[in-house]
Image (cartoon, rainbow, N blue to C red):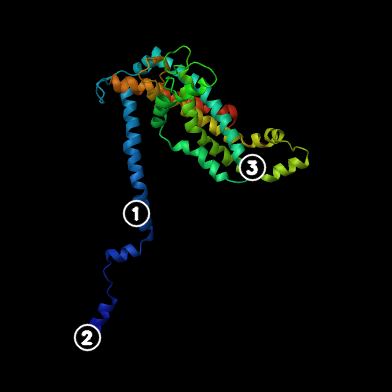
Amino acid sequence: MSVSTSKTVQETRPTRPTILSFWRRAPHLRRSLAFWAMVGPLLLGLLVFVYIPILWGLVLSVSQAHATIFPTAFVGLDNYRTMLLDPEFQQALVTFVVFALFIVPLTFVLALGLALLVNSVRKMRGFFRSVFFLPTAVSYVAASIIWRLSLFNGLPFGLMNMVIGLFGAAPISWLGSPNPPWYWVVLVTVRLWLQLGFYMIIFLAGLQEIPQTLYEAAQVDGISSGWKRFRYITFPLLRNTSIACLLLLLVAAFQAFDEFYNIMLGTGIISVRTPLWYLYVVGFQQQDFGHADAGSFILTAIIILFTLLQGRLFGFGRSLE
C-alpha cells in the first residue's frame, strides 16, 4: 500500500525544467537571439563609428578645440560664423559650383545615352553592362594617379599630348598653370570615367520598368520614330529615375575630394580646393577641429538644403497623373 502510494506521488510530482527543455519550448527567444546576433554587431558599429562621432563633432563645433579632440572652451556659434566668413571656404564652395556645373549634366546625359544604347541591343547586353560598369570598382585614388602621371602628365610623351599632337597641336601643360584652366579637363574626365557606369545601370533599371505595351500602342497611334518615342514615352516615365540620379550626382559633387587632392596636390593652385579638401586642411593640418567640425556641419546643411530644393522643384516621388 505504501509502495503504490509513493509511486503515485513520484509520478504526479512535476519534473524540474532544464535549460535545454526551456530552450526548446521558447522559439521566440531563439528568434530574438538569432536576430540580435546578426543585427547587434551592425548596430554597435554604427553607434561607435557613426553616431558617437557625429555627436562628438557637434560638441566640438561649438567649442574651442585646437590641437586636441576635447573641447577646451565653449564658443557657441562663433566657429560657424568664422567659417561662413572665411574667404578660402567661400572659394571652396565656388569650386564645387563650377565642378557641379560640368560633371552633373555631362554624367546625366552620357549615362542616359549609354543606357538607351545598351538597352536597345539584342545580343551581349550583359557584356556591355559589365564593361561600362567596371570602372566603378576602380579606386578613385588609383584612377587619379593614372590620370595625373600617365594620361595628362603635361609631357610630350603623355597620352593626351600624343593624341593632340597627331592633329598638329603643341603639348599642353594640363596641370601647370591656372590660366587657361586645363586642369578642369583632367578633373572632370576622371570623375566621369569613374561614375558613368553606375548611373547607366540606374537608368537601365528605369528603362526596363517601362511596359512594352506603351511602345506598341504608340506605334499604332503613329509614333514610330525613336526621338518621338523618347520624348513622349521614355523620358517622361524616367522622371523619378532622372531626379534620383540628379540628387545623387549633386551629393557626390559636394563630396569630391580624392581626385582633387591626388591630382592637384603640389601644383600650387589652391583656388581649386573643394570644401572637403579645405576642411581636411583645417582639421588635420592646422589641427583646428572646432572650425573644421563647424564647416562640416555647414556643408551637411547645404547638401540637405540643395537636396530638398531639388526634390521639391522636380516633384520627386509625384505620380505622372
Of tags 2 and 1, the one toward the viewer is 1
User: Which of these two is toward me, 65 or 158?
Assistant: 158
Q: Secondary structure at mark 3?
A: loop
The residue beneath circle 1 is 33
Q: Where, by quadrant of the figure, is residue 57 drawn?
A: top left
Which quadrant is the C terminus positioned in? top right
Q: Is residue 174 above or below residue 237?
A: above
Distance from disc 2 to disc 1, alpha carbons, whole Å, reads 46 Å
Q: Which mark is residue 210?
A: 3
The residue beneath circle 2 is 3
Q: Secondary structure at mark 2?
A: helix
Q: Is residue 317 visible?
A: no
Crowding around mark 2 (Cα neighbors within 10 Å: few <14, some 14 to 19, many 20+) is few
User: Which of these two is toward me, 7 or 148?
Assistant: 148
Distance from disc 1 to disc 3, alpha carbons, whole Å, reads 43 Å
Task: Give how far across and how far down residue 278 sits, in percent.
Answer: 37, 20
Distance from disc 2 to disc 3, alpha carbons, whole Å, reads 83 Å
Q: Where, by quadrant of the figure, is residue 143 drawn?
A: top left
User: Which of these two is toward me, 282 or 296?
Assistant: 282
Looking at the picture, which amino acid does disc 2 mark?
A: Val
Crowding around mark 1 (Cα neighbors within 10 Å: few <14, some 14 to 19, many 20+) is few
* Relative to 138, 220 lies left or right: right
Looking at the picture, which amino acid does disc 3 mark?
A: Ile
Task: Give how far across and how far down residue 205 sits, in percent.
Answer: 57, 41
Q: Is residue 241 above or below residue 68?
A: below
Q: Are marks 2 and 3 in contact (CB under 8 Å)?
A: no
Crowding around mark 3 (Cα neighbors within 10 Å: few <14, some 14 to 19, many 20+) is some
